[in-house]
Image (spheres, rainbow, N blue to C red):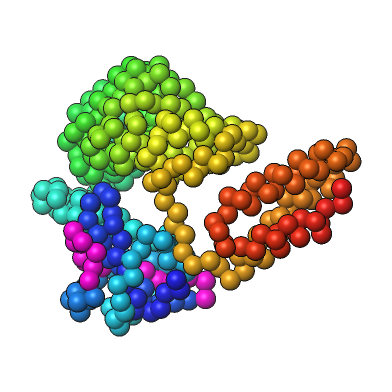
Amino acid sequence: MKPRPGDVFCVYNRSLERYTACQVTKVKEKGVVELVLDWTGDHPLSPEELPVLRPLAVDYLFWSGGYDLTNVPPTVPGNYIHVGNIPPLVEEDSRSYSGWDGGHSIARQRWWDGIPEEKRRAFKAAAAGRGEVEIGGRPVKERTSKVRDDLIPFVDCRELRPLRCLTALECTRWHPGLVEYLKETPFLIDLRLENHGQKRLDLRGTTVRRLTIDLAGMEELWLGETTGSICLTTTAGEDCVIRAPAAGEGLGIDFKRTVQRHPELPALTSVSCTGVEELDLLELRRWYPGLRSLRLWGRPRHLQNFRELKGFKELLRLVGEQPEDAQAQAEAAVTAFVRPFNRMRFIETEEREDVYSALCGLLEELPESALDRRALVDAFEAERDF
């Protein structure tokens, strides 16, 4: 649907296990402004609750209590529920651009509110200050939020304790005291580990959300209770057992070049793969039947059993109202599909039929009545010269 200024929506957030809400405050030529609301519920928002809604004041990490206003794409995601329309709660514009929030902002705020107050105050004081501390024999700003060990040469991770705003740590080698330090600080949410040389690593009890790691040589990895994504830096690591809460429910893995099988993660939620060259979707469905997100980047030479995509019953589609020029875009895509074959002088009757069959196979995957398939076939016939 096309939203209007004042439209209120709710959406289920899996990390909170509750419904959250937002409002469209402005509609622009190429997008809309989304305002996150201070509301959660066990059930979808009702129209009767609209008059009591308020914007969410955000102060987690480096936010200072302002409203979360973001320019987002004009199409409302398919999992958003339209509740009703009230006058926009905020009039100002936004200079931020991103995707629809999905309840993540209020989830972060609730996480922040659960941290002991004295630690939150120390974080804010350091963030607002201009003081310096000594790390590895070098002066470092106390408000530093990211540390790389190749730039700040510390030895033991416990040396980082004076950096009260540290949220990201990148290590090119193993450092003593790492796990102990991670368990002490509730703010370190991004961790990158390379050349660590560990066979077993237990991150339970830490607050790491995003882990980038080389699994080469590892036998077992225990993820923290809040870890939501893993990015693998190499293609190695298929033999490593990854232990995750709820067998991988809510977890996403970013693979390199090939999607690996981890039978200990049957409930894995999201898979992405960069540089992918081949993939068997039937095999993937057998490994991870509960996938809700699948993203592939690269130039797959062999994408086998494409029809099995329909077998992923939980796969989400962020699909709203069809754009007005969808048919024109599809016909342009068909034209682009044909042109490389026009340059191949060896195409005869058999090859022509193979190309036509491939196109028809793709068209059959389209939802019924989504596009004019006959017109797409006509575009194919008009463009080809073989």
Q: Position of residue 277 (x, y in %)?
A: 60, 33
89 up-or-down from 20: above or below: below
Write down the quadrant of residue 179 in the picture: top left
Does residue 236 appear to the left or right of 157 in the view shown?
A: right
Which residue is at a point 40% across and 78% down the rendered structure image?
4
Report the front residue among 98 and 311: 311
The answer to whether residue 39 is magenta is yes
Write down the quadrant of residue 205 in the picture: top left
Does residue 305 appear to the left or right of 96 in the view shown?
A: right
Which residue is at a point 30% across and 83% down the rendered structure image?
87
Q: Position of residue 16 (x, y in %)?
A: 23, 52
161 up-or-down from 48: above or below: above
* Residue 63 visible in the displayed image: no
Q: Position of residue 164 (x, y in %)?
A: 22, 44
Which residue, as the protein is rendered here, is positioned at the far bottom? 87
Does residue 267 appear to the left or right of 98 in the view shown?
A: left
How many discs mark residues in the rendered view? 0
Q: Position of residue 361 (x, y in %)?
A: 65, 46
Report the front residue among 274 and 69: 274
Report the front residue among 248 and 191: 248
Which residue, as the protein is rendered here, is positioned at the far right? 345
Which residue is at a point 61% across and 51% down the rendered structure image?
364
Report the front residue among 136 and 5: 5
Highlighted range, magenta: 29-46
286 up-or-down from 307: above or below: above
The answer to whether residue 287 is magenta is no
* Residue 83 visible in the displayed image: yes
Which residue is at a point 10% across and 52% down the rendered structure image?
117
Quadrant where the N terminus lies? bottom left
